[in-house]
Structure formats: C-alpha cells, structure tokens
Image: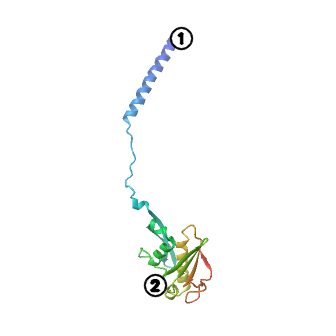
Amino acid sequence: MRRIITISIIICLIIGSIFGVYYFFTKEKDEEIIEYTPQEEISEEQMRQTMVSLYFKSGEEIVPEARLIDVKELLENPYKEILEMLIEGPKNSSLEKTIPEGTKINKIQKQADILIIDFSEEFIKNHKNGEIQEKITVNSIVNTITELTEINGVKITINGEENKSFNDEKIRFNKVFYRE
C-alpha cells in the first residue's frame, strides 16, 4: 500500500512538472513584447521652451497669462525679457495692459532678492490716475517678477530717482513692493 501511494505521488509530481514546463514555455511564446512608443515625439524646439506667467488686468484685478518662451531668450537677462513681454501686453484679448504706453526700461539691477527696475518717465506720465489702477500696475509687475524664485520684492525708480510717485501721489516709489 505504501508503494502505491509513493508511486502515485511520484506520478503526480512528474505530471505536474510536465504541465508546469509546458505552460511556462507556451505562455512565453504566446505573449508579445509590447514596446511603448509615444504618440508624438518631442521636438528639439519644444525641449528648449519653458512656461512663464505674466500678470495682466482683468476687471479690477490681475490674472496670470501663461506664455511659452524659448529658454535661450531668458539666458542673458531674464528680468528684462519678461518685463518687455509685460510691457507689450497680453495675447488674450479679454485682458488689458498694465504698463502705460511708451514706457521703457532704463536699467534693471538685482540686489539680494530684490529687483530694482528703473523705468522711463512715461511710466508715470502716461499712467491712468486712480489708486486702483496704480495698484493693479504695481501688483502686475511684482507678481510677474516674483514668479522667479530668486526674487521676493521689487523696487521701482523713475529715470534713476527713488522718491517718485504716480501723478496723484497715491502710491510712492520710496519702498520695496512685495507680492500681496
């Protein structure tokens, strides 16, 4: 009786092993190796682009407008490049410019985490008066520039002078402006 049980166990092991080997090898042959291919290749041009946020007027507030820009344009002077885009105005027709027409950037200087921007006199001369409009302009500049991680505040000067203000003197440029 022991012999019959032992032979039965050996036969079961042999049959199980044969089935296992057969299953293993047939499964390998039946499965195809599927290689992932992206639907669209990323071009060299796309690899050199980055996203920047510029803040423009929408009603009584400012909202970001995302722009895709070539990284090479930001290498030499990223602050000036971004401010020039802000001066040009939004691409979205529902948004409005915040920096007055004719404004030029005279000089940009970084001191620690503060960016000092020296604008031409058109910045104040061509600005629409009113404290809300003035705050929108300042916040537009500050929010745009502080999107860059190394900048926490903005100091504005006009033709090299620090103690200027908008025409109605509601907002003076004698301090550093921080993101609100």
Residue 152 percent across, percent down from the top left: 59, 71
Q: Quadrant of residue 158?
A: bottom right
In percent of the image, x 49 and y 77: which residue is there? Answer: 57
Q: Is residue 48 left or right of residue 160?
A: left
- 1 or 2: mark nearer the eye: 2
Q: Nearer the viewer, residue 160 or 91?
A: 160
Q: Is residue 151 above or below residue 96?
A: above
Q: Quadrant of residue 180?
A: bottom right
Mark 2, Cα crowd under 10 Å, few <14 / some 14-19 / many 20+, is few
Q: Which mark is residue 2?
A: 1
Q: Nearer the viewer, residue 70 or 41?
A: 70
The residue sitting at the front extreme is 76
Determine if residue 179 is in view.
Answer: no
Question: To which residue does mark 2 refer?
Answer: 102
Q: Is residue 122 left or right of residue 25?
A: right
Residue 139 percent across, percent down from the top left: 55, 77
Task: Assign a secondary structure to mark 1.
Answer: helix
- Labels 1 and 2: the sequence-earlier one: 1
In percent of the image, x 44 and y 27: which residue is there? Answer: 20
Identify the amino acid type marked 1: Arg
The answer for how far apart the CA atoms under marks 1 and 2 are is: 105 Å
